[in-house]
Image (cartoon, rainbow, N blue to C red):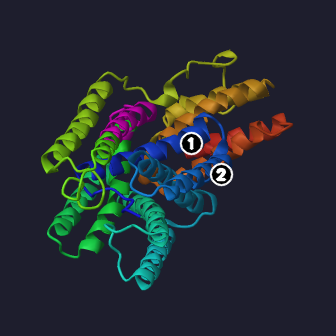
């Protein structure tokens, strides 16, 4: 077979970084906004990935749309693996980072033992392709764990995170271009694009009170996805034209794939970055400064907010996480509905809390991971009580009071 992976160019790195944010936000959208839940989303993501990898394996040469579809889906799956270990099983980020580092080392060791090379310029057998995608999946999981660990441990914010990971990424690129430790430099750069893409994505998506630009996850994902489609389409058209013209090795980078030249590639990559920065900045400038949690906070399914049993939002919830009053406002609304026996209305209103809390996770969690998990567990408890097959009012009210106290511990 011809080599089945793309040339490592500027557009390669731009698409790779953008796919990180698209994969992460799309998984959250399915799990929380659509309401599929973590288990169903994970199953769906791995199922679709298996189909995409089967399509990729069935090709005899590099096919841009199939390859990059697999990368986006691997981004989702790699992130879900780390999140499952951290949020569901309670595995520390220190342990999961070390675990994935060991797994990646084993993949490389077995790959080299079998093939006597780790070069990505000759992925031209089924076995090499299997090793390649195993390494890709592990790098996404490792990048997620290491990036979250650095962000939470250092509490450096999105902009500082983007600068830190961006600087490290550029260093690895320089080493790779200089052919110094080339294999190690490439895979290090590949790992770093995961936390770099996440930092840039969070900087755009998170609301201003949480340190972001307030663009929102949906707008950011659509913008990134549009740029990815444009760059992949350009590569697909160039590849198809070269094959139809019977281009020789000189025109196809020597590996059966089209190459438009370094200048053209840099121009397309620069255009993609300009589109992300320019359009993202323009859209964020027009967004309201209010957090998602405050949207619709004045009225719930049952009309104006009534007096909540705990009155959490009446006090400034000054915690290590910051001002949690917007979330407490929704909790008061849900509590009032539950206290009146309107459990259906309380269940519907609690969806606003779930969506708002999930959207703010990247901004809140690094401030105090311990307190974030306390509130997150309390939210899960309230949602579980409200969404039971036969919810009991007493259980719902108790779970909501626990949630209110976790949002504002000073109320005891």
Q: Which residues are magenta?
A: 207-234
The mark that comes first in sequence, 1 or 2, is 2
Crowd rating for badge 1 (residues with CA inside 10 Å; few <14, some 14–19, many 20+): many
Q: Quadrant of residue 29?
A: top right
* Dominant secondary structure of the residues highlighted in magenta in the image: helix
- Per the image, is 55 magenta? no
Pick whichever, 286 or 399, lies toward us. Answer: 286
**Which quarter of the picture shows residue 348?**
top right
Q: Position of residue 78 (x, y in %)?
A: 50, 58
> Residue at horizontal 30%, vertical 31%?
280
Q: Secondary structure at mark 1?
A: helix
Q: Disc 2 marks which residue? A: 43
Q: Where is residue 313 shown, x and y percent of the image?
A: 56, 31
Q: Identify the residue at horizontal 54%, vertical 43% (top origin).
A: 28
Element type where label 2 sits in the image: helix
User: Residue at 17% across / 41% down in the picture?
Assistant: 267
């Amino acid at each position: 077979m011809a080599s089945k992976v793309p040339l490592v160019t500027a557009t390669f790195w731009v698409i790779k970084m953008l796919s990180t944010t698209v994969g992460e936000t799309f998984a959250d959208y399915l799990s929380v906004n659509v309401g599929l839940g973590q288990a169903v989303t994970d199953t769906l993501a791995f199922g679709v990935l298996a189909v995409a990898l089967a399509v990729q394996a069935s090709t005899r040469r590099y096919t841009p749309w199939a390859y990059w579809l697999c990368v986006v889906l691997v981004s989702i799956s790699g992130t879900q693996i780390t999140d499952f270990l951290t949020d569901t099983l309670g595995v520390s980020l220190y342990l999961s980072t070390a675990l994935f580092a060991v797994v990646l080392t084993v993949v490389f060791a077995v790959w080299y033992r079998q093939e006597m090379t780790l070069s990505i310029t000759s992925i031209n057998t089924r076995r090499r392709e299997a090793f390649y995608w195993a390494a890709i999946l592990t790098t996404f999981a490792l990048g997620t764990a290491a990036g979250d660990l650095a962000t939470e441990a250092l509490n450096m914010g999105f902009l500082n995170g983007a600068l830190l990971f961006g600087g490290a990424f550029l260093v690895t690129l320089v080493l790779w271009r200089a052919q110094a430790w080339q294999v190690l430099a490439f895979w290090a750069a590949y790992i770093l694009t995961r936390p770099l893409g996440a930092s840039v994505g969070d900087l755009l998506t998170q609301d201003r009170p949480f340190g972001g630009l307030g663009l929102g996850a949906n707008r950011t994902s659509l913008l990134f996805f549009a740029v990815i489609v444009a760059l992949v389409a350009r590569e697909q058209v160039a590849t198809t034209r070269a094959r139809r013209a019977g281009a020789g090795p000189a025109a196809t980078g020597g590996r059966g794939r089209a190459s438009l030249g370094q200048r053209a590639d840099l121009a397309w990559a620069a255009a993609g970055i300009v589109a992300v920065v320019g359009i993202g900045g323009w859209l964020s400038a027009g967004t309201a400064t209010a957090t998602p949690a405050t949207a619709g906070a004045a009225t719930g399914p049952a009309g104006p907010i009534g007096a909540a049993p705990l009155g959490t939002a009446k006090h400034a919830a000054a915690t290590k996480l910051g001002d949690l009053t917007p979330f407490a406002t929704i909790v008061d609304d849900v509590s009032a509905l539950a206290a009146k026996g309107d459990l259906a209305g309380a269940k519907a209103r609690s969806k606003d809390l779930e969506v708002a809390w999930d959207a703010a996770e990247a901004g809140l969690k690094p401030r105090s991971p311990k307190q974030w998990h306390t509130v997150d567990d309390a939210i899960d408890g309230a949602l579980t009580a409200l969404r039971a097959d036969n919810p009991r009012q007493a259980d719902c009210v108790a779970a909501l009071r626990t949630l209110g106290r976790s949002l504002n511990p000073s109320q005891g």
